[in-house]
Image: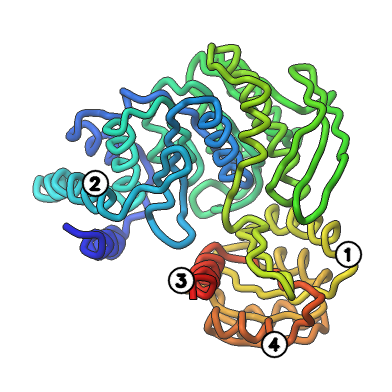
Amino acid sequence: MDYQQALIYLNQICLFRSTTTLGLARIQELLKRIGNPHKKLKCIHVAGTNGKGSACAMLQSILTQSGYKTGLYTSPHIIKYNERFQIDGVCISDQRFAQEVDFIKKYYNQMIDEGLEAPTLFEFLTAICFHYFVQENVDIVILEVGLGGLADATNIIENPLLCLIMSIGIDHIEFLGNTIEEIAIQKAGIIKKNSSVVLYPQKNLVYNKIADICRQKQATLYDLQNNVKTKILLQNLESTLFSVSTKYFMYEMVKLALLGDYQIKNCITVLLACHVLQQYGLQLTKQSILKGIQKTQWQGRMEIVKHNPITMLDGAHNIDGIQMLCRSIKKYFKHKKITLLLGILSDKEYQKMVEAILPIADTVVLTEPMSNRKLSIEELEKTILCFHKKVYKHTDVIGAYQTALSVTSQKDAIICCGSLYMIGELKNYISRLEVL
């Protein structure tokens, strides 16, 4: 099997598997057939609605700088499946990815032939993750939850080194529940008995629910709800420099390359995770932690891909993510006119997302992400009429981007957001332009 054949096979799984039932039975059976590789790995498990990808990237960079061979499993990918499987920041090769797909395929087909329920695409990819990282003898795996936590395929792990729960908000209500409390219970499903839990600052309702679950499971909770003193020393489009003091640690000069006000809180939560890992014997020095943070990159999150005009891609695709993005835009671009390139999926809280971000835009370009869940331009346009903005439309994402470029002054900015599908398409297009 070569790489293209692997992609064709994975697309067939997407078409074949239509069930939306959640649970661990399928991944448990699949992993048992390949020797339960997940039981041979040391894992840091990361859940949350927003910020978990950035936190995973920071932790990977820190652990790599500290001399640990570090595996990273994330989702979704922006351009290629390979992005989901990294070791020390390097994606799995096309050839090796095809080999892994071919290996797992045998056991996947066995389950179907025996009349068992077929694993989902994400479960198939999670099996690749565990098998690949065991074969490569990684020291530690950073494991990002795909959806929720409790019934997510990654929750098959039994004794995580650390459970890290980032910002929790409303998203995926069709699977996780209609209230913030119900969603918090799903996210907290990664907490195991006697485990250590690091928690991002949360709303009181969320914090109290997770603290209660920790007590029930006799898990040790480390949080940043109170007594966190942060001082921003420098913040521009190149980097952020800040100092922080908590009851657990103090850092005087933290240099963060990731943009966004919210990344400071993400970073401080990661610093707390490092503190806990140090208590468990990991050799993380202050120097390696700071160097790892400084070197962290995470594509598709307030990522500047072009200058003149500044073009920024951001994967914000829910109301909390959009609100965080808005706060950052006001800080970084307060003297620029903003062209907003917007495409959203129909199963998102798109009306609330529009209400949050339209006030900061001077011009709007609407498009449709490449997904069968896309919100049509016509429906999206209805939600923005009351804002009386100058609106352009193009169903094709690349055509919409070219329109945005044509109507934006060289000294102003284009902000692209609303869907990771759209961001992936734009990232791929702009990357190819750079190569040419």
Work out how far the residue at label 2 is from the one at label 1, CA to CA, in angstroms: 48 Å
Residue 307 to residue 248: above or below: below
In primary-sequence order, the first of circles 1 and 4 is: 1
On the rendered structure, is 276 left or right of 148? right
Between disc 3 and disc 2, the foreground one is 2
Which badge, 2 or 4, comes first in the chain's sequence? 2
Gap in angstroms between the C-alphas marked 3 and 1:
33 Å
- The residue singled out by tag 4 in the image is 406
The residues tagged by marks 3 and 2 sit, at their Cα atoms, a distance apart of: 26 Å
Task: Report the amino acid beneath label 3.
Answer: Ser
Tell me, yes or no, whether the two marked residues, 2 and 4, touch with CB atoms within 8 Å.
no
Q: Earlier along the polypeptide chain: callout 3 or callout 2?
A: 2
Query: What percent of the width, then of the height, locates residue 17?
Result: 28, 58
The residue that label 2 is drawn on is: 100
Q: Residues within 10 Å of mark 3 (few under 14, many from 20)?
A: few
Q: Is residue 327 shown left or right of residue 58?
A: right
Q: Quadrant of residue 213?
A: top right
Check disc 4 and give the amino acid type. Answer: Ser
Amino acid type, label 1: Lys
Residue 102 placed where, x, y %? 18, 50
Q: Which residue does the numbered mark 1 point to in the structure image?
A: 334
Q: Residue at x 76, y 34 (%)?
A: 254
Near mark 4 (Cα within 10 A), the count class, few <14, some 14-19 or many ≥20, is few
Mark drawn on residue 371: 3
Is residue 141 visible in the rendered image? The answer is yes
